Amino acid sequence: MHSVTPDIWLSNILGFPCYRAESPTNLAEATFLVGEIKRQVSGRAFAYVKVPCSAVGVAALYMEHGYRVVDVGITFKRPPDPRSAPNPDSTFCVRVASATDLLDAREIASQCIVYSRFHLDPRFGQHIGNSVNWAWMDSYCHGQRGEIVYMAEIDGRRAGFIAVLRDSTGPHSFRVIDLIGVRPDFQRRGIGQALMNKFIDDTLLLNLPMKVTTQAANIPAVNLYERNGFQLAESMFVLHKHFP
């Protein structure tokens, strides 16, 4: 049986209890989780659950209990085979981020990442979405999350970053794009592609498969990943409920 766990990290950001339900696969499990969350909640709180898009009946059950779909998360995977057409750009410096770079990456994340489930949830919106992005990258700054961050630089300015972690929870270890962002005034100049090139090149050296999850609403990101050989592997409804 799946379980409900407090999301301490998110609770600390939002200032009230947050709960995460493991992805249910059938109506019986979903019914149990709905009741379990209700038993744990007292006063103001927030809960979220991710449901496979193939389990429409499960998503409908949650919606009957006040949950709302705010996002469709889509996961792409890529095997560790060389890409056929490297990006020819050579004007961008992409390097391992320093401690100072990480502070800039945190600021870039709060400026340019606008498709997160927090941004898309009208009960949260831009301010909360930006706060979550800031805290996400802050965990990299303090060495609490992730494997490495790459920083792109152009004309002496830090223009974009890609944050990477290792996922070894399943039978296969993946190198994962955790977050990618380009400063708004540097977008549409090939910096995202340059960051992808660095990530793919270094991951190929490790002979590891690659993975990334984004939002269906984030069409530019979807195009970027498909252009670089990533293939759709999974889709999930993301449902939120606010108490009271």
Image (spheres, rainbow, N blue to C red):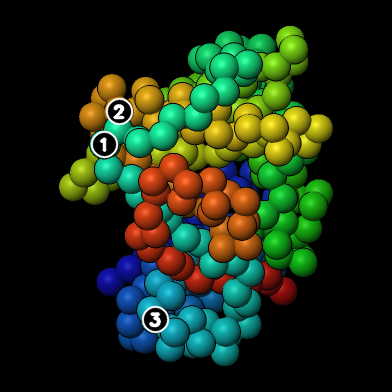
**Residue 193 seen anywhere in this rendered image of the structure:** yes
Q: Amino acid at mark 1?
A: Asp
Report whether 72 appears left or right of 30: right
Q: Amino acid at mark 2?
A: Leu
Look at the numbered disc 3 and give the secondary structure of its residue: loop
Report whether 83 appears left or right of 182: left
| Residues at discs 1 and 3 in contact (Cβ within 8 Å) | no
Q: Considering only order in the chain, which callout, 2 or 1, is on the residue closer to the N terminus? A: 1
For label 1, the crowd category at 10 Å Cα-Cα, with few meaning under 14, some 14 to 19 and many 20 or more, is: few
Q: Quadrant of the C terminus?
A: bottom right
Residue hosting label 2: 204
| Residues at discs 1 and 2 in contact (Cβ within 8 Å) | yes
> Percent position (x, y) of residue 190?
63, 32
Cα separation between marks 2 and 3: 35 Å
Report whether 64 appears left or right of 231: right
> Percent position (x, y) of residue 77?
35, 49
Kindly report which numbered mark, 1 or 2, lies closer to the viewer in this rendering.
1
For label 2, the crowd category at 10 Å Cα-Cα, with few meaning under 14, some 14 to 19 and many 20 or more, is: some
Question: On the image, which quarter does residue 101 sit in?
Answer: top right
Q: Considering only order in the chain, which callout, 3 or 1, is on the residue closer to the N terminus? A: 3
Residue hosting label 1: 81
